[in-house]
Image (cartoon, rainbow, N blue to C red):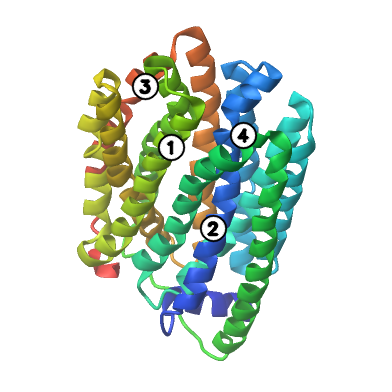
């Protein structure tokens, strides 16, 4: 293990104090990053009409974005655990900036795919390193730091559709260029965060530490990681159904306008942000496992009821679903980090990668299925997924390490 690696492990295992400005900075850029990402699905109705796209093509756009946003994340995390590269943080936002600029100017479906891939590449570079920095700055309050980091992304995902409805939908594709300003601000902030990380590594190099054992056998660790992966699958396939097809569901079933559908989507995504804030600190206090158990399985009655509700009921249920289900992800990430101590970037990259990967594949499959059946049918089908939350019973008790 190199000196820099020991420094990174020391920071991950026993950070000296909560560096709230750093956590806040990476959370803020997470907001900007995910706000930019959220622009893409938010303008799907406009793109569908402008380019005469099918639901399958809409799903393919999401698939390309999610694949590029997921495949590189574990590799980036694995590499930066051994050779920390703080400079990757602003570099990731540069890719996002290039993708945004392309998205505002392209005039063909193939170029839409390329622009989506560039935005995804920016995310795959940003997430694992930023998540590792959040843990480094946590002062041992891992759930809180991860929740603050994650809520930035959720807030951005909520604001993206709202800003798209206010700025892009009335003015057209060219107005996407205004969102490049958010990417530029993100680059500037991440350059400052990178300097903090370099200084922290230099300080930590003077200390030595041993990465803590998780107290489990290799078989138990693998089983727990598999359960967490299945829970991520159930959570993000359902969340993909809502975030990508909710507007179409409202338009088709209740004949709401495109602009009004974006406001309903904003309410759901805002609830997701609030739920994320709640889940992290609660996990620090009572343990990750109870939070994971309740947040996924507890959403099942709500998801099963949603396809049979009126417009008001759908609005209320989606807000409740967002609150309940979103509390799980920060707990899942921290749980996974504690299962594989010393490899924070890699495990964060794997789980963020799975999040994007499952979401992308689900978007493509659900788009094809919606073309073959109906939007209502895929909502009824996906409603059963939260029942996989029962798998949380096989997670080990990690309270000793929490």
The residue sitting at 50% across, 63% down in the picture is: 27
The residue sitting at 55% across, 75% down in the picture is: 8
Q: How many marks?
A: 4
Residue 286 picture quarter: bottom left
Q: Earlier in the sequence, mark 3 or mark 2?
A: 2
Q: Earlier in the sequence, mark 3 or mark 1?
A: 1
Extreme bottom residue here?
206
**Distance CA(mark 3)–CA(mark 1):** 19 Å
Residue at mark 3? 379
For label 3, the SS is helix
Residue at mark 1? 263
Which of the image's four quarters has the N terminus? bottom right
**Distance CA(mark 3)–CA(mark 2):** 29 Å
The residue sitting at 59% across, 53% down in the picture is: 33
Q: Residues within 10 Å of mark 3 (few under 14, many from 20)?
A: many
Extreme front residue here?
170
**Distance CA(mark 1)–CA(mark 4):** 15 Å
> Which x, y percent locates residue 397?
23, 57
Residue at mark 2? 30
Residue at mark 4? 170
Nearer to us of marks 2 and 4 is 4
Q: Residues within 10 Å of mark 2 (few under 14, many from 20)?
A: many
């Amino acid at each position: 293990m190199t000196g820099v690696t020991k420094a990174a492990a020391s920071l991950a295992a026993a950070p000296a104090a909560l560096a709230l400005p750093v956590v806040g900075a990476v959370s803020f850029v997470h907001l900007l990053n995910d706000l930019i990402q959220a622009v893409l699905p938010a303008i799907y109705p406009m793109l569908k009409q402008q380019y005469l796209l099918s639901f399958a093509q809409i799903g393919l756009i999401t698939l390309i974005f999610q694949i590029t946003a997921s495949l590189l994340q574990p590799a980036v995390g694995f590499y930066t655990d051994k050779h920390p590269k703080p400079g990757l943080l602003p570099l990731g936002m540069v890719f996002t900036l290039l993708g945004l600029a392309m998205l505002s100017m392209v005039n063909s479906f193939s170029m839409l795919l390329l622009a989506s891939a560039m935005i995804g590449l920016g995310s795959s570079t940003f997430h694992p390193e930023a998540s590792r920095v959040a843990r480094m700055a946590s002062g041992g309050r891992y759930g809180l730091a991860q929740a603050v980091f994650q809520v930035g992304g959720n807030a951005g995902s909520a604001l993206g559709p709202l800003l798209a409805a206010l700025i892009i939908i009335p003015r057209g594709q060219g107005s996407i260029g205004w969102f490049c300003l958010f990417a530029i601000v993100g680059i500037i902030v991440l350059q400052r965060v990178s300097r903090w990380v370099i200084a922290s590594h230099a300080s930590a190099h003077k200390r030595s530490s041993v990465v803590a054992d998780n107290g489990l056998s290799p078989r138990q660790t693998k089983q727990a990681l598999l359960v967490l992966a299945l829970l991520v699958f159930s959570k993000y396939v359902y969340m993909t159904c809502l975030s990508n097809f909710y507007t179409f569901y409202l338009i088709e079933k209740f004949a709401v306008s495109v602009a009004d559908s974006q406001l309903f989507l904003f309410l759901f995504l805002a609830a997701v942000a609030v739920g994320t804030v709640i889940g992290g600190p609660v996990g620090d206090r009572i343990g990750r496992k109870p939070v994971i158990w309740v947040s996924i399985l507890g959403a099942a009655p709500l998801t099963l009821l949603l396809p049979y509700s009126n417009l008001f009921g759908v609005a209320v249920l989606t807000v409740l679903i967002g609150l309940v289900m979103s509390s799980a992800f920060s707990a899942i990430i921290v749980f996974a980090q504690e299962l594989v101590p010393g490899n924070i970037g890699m495990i964060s990259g794997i789980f963020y990668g799975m999040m994007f990967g499952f979401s992308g594949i689900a978007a493509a499959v659900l788009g094809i299925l919606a073309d073959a059946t109906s939007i209502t049918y895929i909502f009824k089908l996906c409603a059963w997924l939260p029942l996989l939350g029962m798998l949380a019973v096989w997670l080990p008790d990690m309270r000793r390490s929490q």
